Amino acid sequence: MMIRKQNGQDGFTVWITGLPFTGKKETGSILAQRLEHLGYKTEVLIGGEIRRQYAKKLGFTKEEIYQNVLRIAFECKILSENGVIAIAVTVSPFRELREECRQKIGRFVEVYHRAPLQVLKERDKKGLFKKAEEGLLKNVAGISLPYEESENPELIIDADRLSPLESANLILLKLQELNLLEEAEHSVLLKREEDDIRRILKETWSK
């Protein structure tokens, strides 16, 4: 028997993708908190944590990236089918890989966190990008491994301009527009928050 919200809400997957240090993890955490406050059951799956849990020696070749990301997609599919809102946080740099995940999961909302590489380098306290540029690390997305943007993600977030809270609120608004949240719960955002979000979107579209 499927586990669902009392009002019969079906599960689905929010797939938050983008280069390292765009704030995906923080956005996913806040999104989960907001949804749980509404009574939805959620599960956040972090790509790096899944990788360490199942295969500590798994590397970052294209084949190994596929292996890890498809494992995340399988978990999201099971969760979604059982009435849970799965929130996947993963670089998943290949366009065809994300499309394969979409096909496998079904109810799938892709959120692309984007930001200029220079901004991400400034945020990189671990020195990941620097090590990749020096040849000390291989297959680092954004440096030695290209990130392939999707043609039509459900939502694009300019992560260099928006905070994780603002980003999570944008996702909530998109989920409402896609009718993935109950009609009665369109008050999930405060009126002030909705006005701020619409202002941000208007500024973005006008550029």
Image (cartoon, helix red, strand yellow):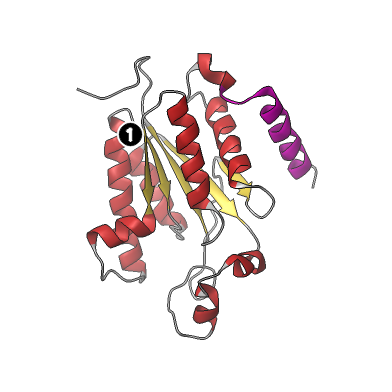
The image quadrant that residue 155 belongs to is top right
Which residue carries the number 1 mark? Answer: 80
Percent x, y for residue 182? 47, 18
> Is residue 175 located in the magenta-colored stretch of the structure?
no
Relative to 96, 129 lies left or right: right
Percent x, y for residue 124? 56, 68
Q: Residue 24, relative to residue 206: is it above or below?
A: below
Q: Residue at x 55, y 49 (%)?
A: 112
Identify the amino acid type marked 1.
Answer: Ser
Q: Nearest the camera: 19 or 41?
A: 41
The image quadrant that residue 192 belongs to is top right
Relative to 71, 169 lies left or right: right
The image quadrant that residue 123 belongs to is bottom right
Q: For the magenta stretch, what is the residue range? A: 188-205
Label 1: few (<14), some (14–19) or many (≥20) C-alpha neighbours in 10 Å:
many
Relative to 91, 198 lies left or right: right
Q: Residue at x 60, y 26 (%)?
A: 189
> Is residue 189 located in the magenta-colored stretch of the structure?
yes
Residue found at the far left of this picture? 1
Percent x, y for residue 144? 50, 76
Q: Secondary structure at mark 1?
A: helix
Q: Residue 14, relative to residue 139: is it above or below?
A: above
